[in-house]
Amino acid sequence: AVADATGAFKVDVTGLKAPLLITATASAGDAVRVYHTLLATDVAAGATAHANVTQLTDAIVALASSDGSTPGEFASADKLKALDPAKLQKAQELVKTVVKDVAAALGATAYDPVTTPFKADAANGADKLLDSVKMSIDQNGVSLRVVNVSMPDVANGAASASVVTLKDSNAAAPAALP
């Protein structure tokens, strides 16, 4: 499927069984970015489901992987079939917890990285959040970093920027990004 100008896409999944891996590629200058998302439950016949494919869903998929840093491993049918839905759910909750304060500050108070519909138009809170949280993945795990958002530091009221690195979806959630 090809995304429209707002970033939306539609795919008919009739007859497909979960889990489903959705991969999106986007050019950014000379680089090509690849993002993933996973749907862990079947979509009922005649029903629709919403799934975002962003850097935050890629972080979730990476955390659900066997080593906590390889979202592409689920391109293997065997690895996809072996997906632990509980681990995926924990990874999703972990990422939601980490970005919740930034999301709220940008007007996306009930934001869920996988299911919150949004338009890629820089006008709504969810898109502002995605523009403000940068993600990288390496052997140390998933790093999320806030940019272009001035958030007061809880301790002294000063503006702060922060990085959170996550490696294991089973670990306790670190403090939310400020």
Image (cartoon, helix red, strand yellow):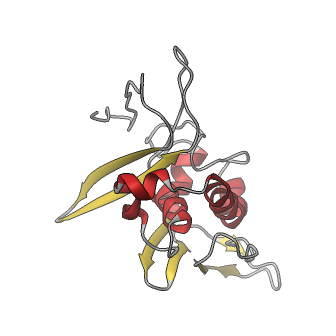
Q: Is residue 11 left or right of residue 172?
A: left
**Position of 27 relative to 10 (above/below):** below
Determine the image quadrant of residue 105. Answer: bottom right
Residue 106 image point, x, y percent: 64, 53
**Position of 164 relative to 45 (above/below):** below
Determine the image quadrant of residue 177. Answer: bottom right
Of 61 and 9, which appears nearest the observer?
61
In the rendered view of the protein, which quadrant contains the N terminus?
top left
**Position of 160 relative to 25 (above/below):** below
Query: Which residue does the image show at 79% across and 80% down from the upper left?
Result: 157
Of 114 and 20, which appears nearest the observer?
20
In the rendered view of the protein, which quadrant contains the C terminus?
bottom right
Q: Is residue 91 left or right of residue 144?
A: right
**Position of 107 relative to 105 (above/below):** above
User: Residue lying farthest left?
Assistant: 30
Determine the image quadrant of residue 156. Answer: bottom right
User: Residue lying farthest right?
Assistant: 155
Question: Tag count in the figure?
Answer: 0
Query: Which residue does the image show at 54% across and 27% down from the upper left?
Result: 43
User: Residue lying farthest top?
Assistant: 46
Q: Is residue 147 left or right of residue 138?
A: right
Query: Which residue does the image show at 73% across and 77% down from the upper left?
Result: 174
- Report if residue 54 is visible in the image: no
Residue 74 image point, x, y percent: 41, 57
Q: Is residue 154 left or right of residue 137?
A: right
- Report if residue 82 is visible in the image: yes
Of 48 and 102, which appears nearest the observer?
48
Query: Which residue does the image show at 40% across and 55% down from the upper left?
Result: 78
Residue 159 image point, x, y percent: 67, 78
Residue 141 image point, x, y percent: 51, 79
Of 165 and 66, which appears nearest the observer?
66
